[in-house]
Image (spheres, rainbow, N blue to C red):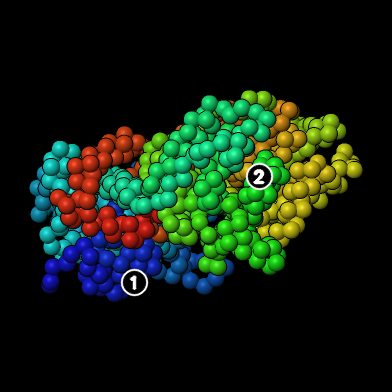
Amino acid sequence: MTQASLDTRLDGVVGARTAKPLERAFEMRTVSDLLHHFPRRYSRRGELTPLRGLPIGEQITVVAQVLDVRERRMQRRNGSLLEARITDGTGTLTLTFFNQQWRSRELVAGRRGIFAGKVSEYRGNLQLQHPEYELFENRDEAPGAEQLDEAAAKAWAETPVPIYPATAQLPSWTIQRAVELALDALGPVPDPLPAEIREAEGVMPYGRALELIHRPQHDADWRGAQQSLRFREAFELQLALLDRRRRAGLEASTPRPLAAGTAAATPLCRFDAALPFDLTGDQRLAGETIARELAQPHPMHRLLQGEVGSGKTLVALRAMLQVAASGGQSALLAPTEVLAAQHFRSITDVLGPDLTAELNPVLLTGRMPAAERKRALLSLASGSCRIAVGTHALISDNVTFYDLGFIVVDEQHRFGVEQREALRRKGASPHVLAMTATPIPRTVALTAFGDLEVTTIRELPPGRQGIETFTVPELEMPNRAARVWARTAEDLASGRQVYVVCPAISAGEVDPELDVEETAEGARPLANVEDTVAELRRRPEYAGVQIEGLDGGMASDEKDRIMRGFAEGRIGILVATTVIEVGVNVPNASIMIVRDADRFGISQLHQLRGRVGRGEHPGLCLLMTAAEQGSVARERIEAVAATSDGFALAEVDLELRREGDILGTAQSGGRSTLKLLRVAEHGELISHARDVAAALLERDPKLHTAPQLAELIAREHEAGLLDNLAKS
């Protein structure tokens, strides 16, 4: 057989019958894809997997021993039922097979193997119906005691058995067989990592690491291979991100310096002079940093992160005015129509009539009337508009800018790199400022946004009244839940306004922007906007109060009508989905009620409560939940109630959430961008790998001394593997 390389197509090595299901389940197409599908864990033939606490409804793979087998006739249908109990020595799991008596000849008491299937419950007992299994004696052809000495038998029993991420159609042992075929066919593996880095970091050769992670003889084999491959993953990721930053810095861009001449004549100076308040220290420092970078002949690529309400948009607007002084245009990209419209109103309000007339800001969304859209497009193409605010509509092919010099991407985790790049291509290497109100732990920033410089605003503007947050456990404390609505009536009577946020739009439609997917087994239907509006309108204590619902699927003019009504104080209670999560600013709103708060992520809850306490009245956030005490969902809620520090919450979020959720790469049954690297656990490794990568690029920016590494990085850029990380 011809030796295979990592780039060899999988069907030429394992056969089409195996390759096709691997591609369907895991997007595997090459030998490299298969060999980078690493074992989830390792078991031993002589060691059993704990069977207690197995998750009902999930696909599991366990190593266990057959305890006993019995066959009985079924009472309500023809045929027989074969039941085999397997055990780990403490707990048991029942395997059930219909009309398959022949399995009793295989499933003999005392035999061990790997068993895979979906866990279900029947009469209080856990079971697997028609599971797949592979008995060790069948698979490994283990010799009998007369052919093995004690030492050899012990070694056979203790050799690690890899357990792979699998599906019902592709059990772990099928994947293992495919891996072994690929390893047997694989020729010498070129190592892209320079020898001096391998030696300095104690990293084993690439081919050796792939062999040992899949076919270890001892635990030390797979542990060493994991460590080596994890460093490679961190190093290659950081090298690619730093290389992207280096190449972006080499692009030519139009400098947009602070305008010289009479201070009063520049839009920025006129704007600053009219501000009724002073900038915070953090806002001033961030503005100075951005102003310097806008003046450079290469494009700025910066991430501005800060607490909810810290004034990031003001910093971005001041930068837009700096660009406008040179005749350049700025575009603010927002993830939703509600947020785009809110930004547009805020910008025109704070600019005042004179600057608004001079800069002619326009709003561009996908659902605006054709006549308005046409006027906006003409203003952008002619250059009469200096500031554009919009949604994904800004990226459309028919949108042309006269001189796009500056892009602001708000809540940038809602957009991928490819969308940011599509907008950048509408200008001549414009400067880019990404913004997020979701504080990002350093390791996540290095992993997901490592191609951006980071500026942080922690300081809140003076005069903010603060927000108190309380958990409201509806089942444990029904009186407290009833008090929520009484307190709401009190604030409404005092002339203030209230948000009520629900995880669903209607009884059959969940908010697509929810961070959290899981819900308790058998839980009651989720609170939804439609039913909540109807319920609150029926309450006598809200008689005379205007109550409206808002969700992202509404027509643009309807959303705008409702938001204007709430902003102007005509609407007392706004019942909404997460469409009001960011950017919405109504200073008179004093209470934020979140129903079924366990269905929201930590960052979402922190963002939502930031909608209140923005004026002269203190804010109150009430997180209603039926989640049980001690559950992860309840931990999330209580973490938010315990602190208003978004940076502390970001660290808690990192500990509680799955890796794929953090980086936006989780795909059910699909391929994850990160294989062995876990940002929640490997922060020091990521930081160290970045230092090593930076040192290599400093002495060899174009990687002339490491051509294989240069090719690997180029392929990662081309394949868009980094783009997935930037969607987090």
Horizontal side of 436 relative to 562 (left or right) equals left
Residue at 40%, 51% (x, y): give it. Answer: 253
Residue 231 in percent (x, y) is at 25, 43
Q: Nearer the viewer, residue 233 or 55?
A: 233
Residue 316 in percent (x, y) is at 54, 41
Q: Nearer the viewer, mark 1 or mark 2?
A: 2
Question: Does residue 486 show up?
Answer: no
Residue at 30%, 67% (x, y): give it. Answer: 29
Horizontal side of 658 relative to 154 (left or right) equals right
Q: Nearer the viewer, residue 314 or 120?
A: 314
Q: Nearer the viewer, residue 469 or 138?
A: 469
The image quadrant where one finds the N terminus is: bottom left
In the rendered image of this protein, does residue 213 appear above or below residue 627?
below
Mark 1 residue type: Lys
Residue 49 in percent (x, y) is at 34, 45
The residue most toward the front is 261
Residue at 23%, 58% (x, y): give it. Answer: 711
Query: How many C-alpha atoms fall within 10 Å of the one at disc 2: few (<14), some, or many (≥20)?
Result: some
Horizontal side of 369 relative to 396 (left or right) equals right
The residue most toward the bottom is 16
Mark 2 residue type: Leu
- Measured Cα–Cα span from mark 1 to mark 2: 61 Å
Q: What residue is shown with label 2?
A: 355
Q: What residue is shown with label 1?
A: 20
Q: Nearer the viewer, residue 76 or 280?
A: 280
Q: SS of the residue at dot 1? A: helix
Horizontal side of 26 relative to 152 (left or right) equals right
Residue 509 in percent (x, y) is at 66, 58
Question: Does residue 326 show up?
Answer: yes
